[in-house]
Image (spheres, rainbow, N blue to C red):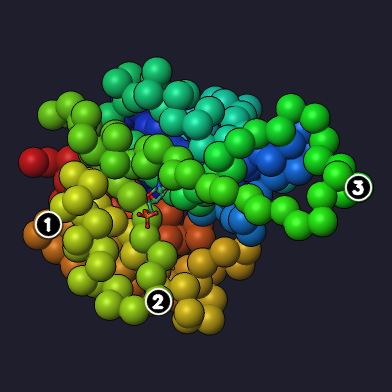
Amino acid sequence: LEKKDLDGKRVLITAGPTREYLDPVRFISNRSSGKMGFALAEEAYKRGAKVTLVSGPVNIQTYADIEIVNVETAYEMYEEVKSIKDKYDILIFSAAVADFKPKNFRESKIKKEQEQELQIELQKNPDILKYAGETKKDWQIVVGFSAETENLIENSKKKLYEKNADLIVANNVLQEGAGFNVDTNIVTLISKEKVLELPKLSKEEVAGRIFDFIVDYLCRR
Ligand code: C5P
């Protein structure tokens, strides 16, 4: 029996890594596979939602009915989210956005002959989750992720308030079977009123529990 408890809801999800270019052929990125974001998109779609995924470069196929907007850099992801976000009821930020980008983009390829040493200066990227939280409409639910190595609950609660989110999905990245590039995740769901610790689950099961939490505790406010 399929739950259709997201019928009529519009869901926006960010997924995957971003790429921050140094020159036309080189970039800084991370190991995010996009699996968690795509699992969330498929779960929302199965439960009746209209889903848009704003995704960095990943190697995952999904249902044709899920709209995918491909982006590369954090700034492109930010611009895209900014321009479409008010069309959505539930916004989930599962992308592993690069916190920094090279300060100076070199228009032509950096040549090793020209340098003995190379310094790369970095500057902060926009925080997309924070922006969505700060500009949140009263019908919107904003969900963020947090990867911590210590004080999981405390640091995630802080993030919840600082970014004006409704839910933080917190994972301790030091635990085996959690985080980047694995098929499982061990997370704790943290809202202003509730803390729910989950066991090790597949990313599909985690996606199911996240939407259960949203439907049970956040949608009926
Ligand atoms: O502050 P921190 O990077 O730990 O927050 C992680 C959460 O914020 C994730 O949900 C991530 O998708 C989101 N984020 C973002 N834009 C950034 C950095 C993080 O949306 N530039």
Q: Secondary structure at mark 3?
A: helix
Image quadrant occupied by the C terminus: top left
Residue at image position (29%, 41%) is 130
Residue topped by disc 1? 192
Nearest to viewer (mark 1 / mark 3): 3
Residue at image position (38%, 70%) is 148
Q: Which mark is residue 149?
A: 2
Q: Nearer the viewer, residue 63 or 135?
A: 135
Q: Amino acid at mark 2?
A: Thr
Q: CA distance from mark 1 to mark 2?
A: 21 Å
Q: Is the distance from the Cβ of mark 2 to the nearest ligand 1 atom less than 8 Å?
A: no
> Is residue 156 something that shows in the picture?
yes
Q: Which mark is residue 142?
A: none
Q: Secondary structure at mark 1?
A: loop
Q: Earlier in the sequence, mark 1 or mark 2?
A: 2
**Hey, which quadrant is residue 137 in on the image?**
top left
Q: Earlier in the sequence, mark 1 or mark 3?
A: 3
Q: Nearer the viewer, residue 173 or 219?
A: 173
**Hey, which quadrant is residue 190 in on the image?**
bottom left
Residue topped by disc 3? 113
Relative height, residue 138 to residue 123 (above, below): above
Q: How many marks?
A: 3
Q: Amino acid at mark 3?
A: Glu
Describe residue 84's horizontal placement relative to residue 180 as left or right.
left
Q: CA distance from mark 3 to mark 2?
A: 41 Å
Q: CA distance from mark 1 to mark 3?
A: 56 Å
Q: Earlier in the sequence, mark 3 or mark 2?
A: 3
> Is residue 51 something that shows in the picture?
no
Kindly check if marks 1 and 2 are in contact, taking CB atoms under 8 A apart as contact.
no
Q: Is the distance from the Cβ of mark 1 to the nearest ligand 1 atom less than 8 Å?
A: no
